[in-house]
Amino acid sequence: MTLRELARAADAFAPTPPMPVLFLGHGSPMNAIEDNPFTQGWQSVGRDLPRPSAIVCISAHWETRGTYVTGMEKPRTIHDFGGFPQALFDVQYPAPGSPELAQMTQETMTASHVGIDHAWGLDHGAWSVIIHLFPKADIPVVQLSLDRGLSPAQHYALGRELAFLRKKGILIIGSGNMVHNLGMIDWHNPDGGYDWAQEASSRMDRSILDGDHNNLVNYTSNGRAFQLAIPTPEHYLPLLYTLALKEATDPISLFNDKLMMGSLSMTSVRIG
């Protein structure tokens, strides 16, 4: 950063008490335009949050080789899905970006080189939930990508490096799903989960509330229920970023803690 850019960043992100941290089980893109218990849960949390100076979102839907943060002033709304009603494609979430925050993040995180991206924008893992927290789209939003080459432990370590942002008034959101096996969806069972999904979800919840992060980071060693719940890691990894930010004195709670369609959990987490 130039001296002028550093001054602008300092003015924009003055010290604050630690902001809460959220993991949001985002589920179907249709949640962006539906009124249901999950969207109502997000809205309730949004009303209870201090107003952030900016938002950093780690979404399951931006995987890259290397780690990147969006650095454009006006991120586009990405409709990265198909087969949904036109009303969903018509949604725009014109929140500003924050080049200053992108540069500050790049220069502070050292566990992995962070590049600045000017092409991505806000994918549905970000805007479909943030639209319920802050519907006016008047808070700057940047996304941090998921590096496919990192291990779960490395993702967790990278999450720790975002801790300084909490004291700059910045809300950090992980967006994914803890249980996410689309190949085993039961379309005839909108409520509830398979036995293995119930087992995995219950064990995840207990580890979160007990602060057993090692168990969650080493999820591949947790047996068949976890293997079925997390057949690919991208929807699970945002949880590790948020858990890495928990300090010893932070309260932690679950909401939207429900299984649906057999193999999908909407469980969300608030820290702080």
Image (cartoon, helix red, strand yellow):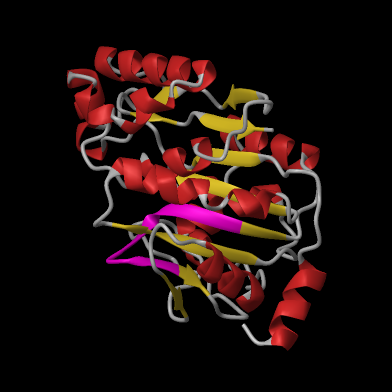
Q: Quadrant of residue 22?
A: top right
Q: Position of residue 152 (x, y in %)?
A: 31, 42
Image quarter (top left, top right, bottom left or bottom right) of the N terminus: bottom right
Q: Position of residue 118 (x, y in %)?
A: 47, 81
Chain part drawn in magenta: 56-68
- Is any atom of residue 81 visible in this view? yes
Residue at 68% in and 49% down: 166
Image: 224 above or below 61: above
Please state if 62 lies on the left or on the right of 19 as rendered: left
Residue at 17% in and 20% down: 224
Please state if 205 lies on the left or on the right of 225 as rendered: right
Magenta stretch containing residue 102, yes or no? Answer: no
Counting the numbered discs, the total is 0
Residue at 77% in and 79% down: 7
Dominant secondary structure (helix, strand or loop) of the stretch shown in magenta: strand
Please state if 240 lies on the left or on the right of 71 as rendered: left
Looking at the picture, tell me which residue is in the foreground, 196 or 213: 213
Q: Position of residue 148 (x, y in %)?
A: 26, 56
- Is any atom of residue 33 visible in this view? no
Q: Quadrant of residue 46?
A: top right
Looking at the picture, tell me which residue is in the foreground, 193 or 221: 221
Magenta stretch containing residue 65, yes or no? Answer: yes
Please state if 44 lies on the left or on the right of 92 as rendered: right
Image: 132 above or below 147: above
Q: Position of residue 98 (x, y in %)?
A: 64, 73
Image quarter (top left, top right, bottom left or bottom right) of the C terminus: top right
Looking at the picture, tell me which residue is in the foreground, 249 or 265: 249
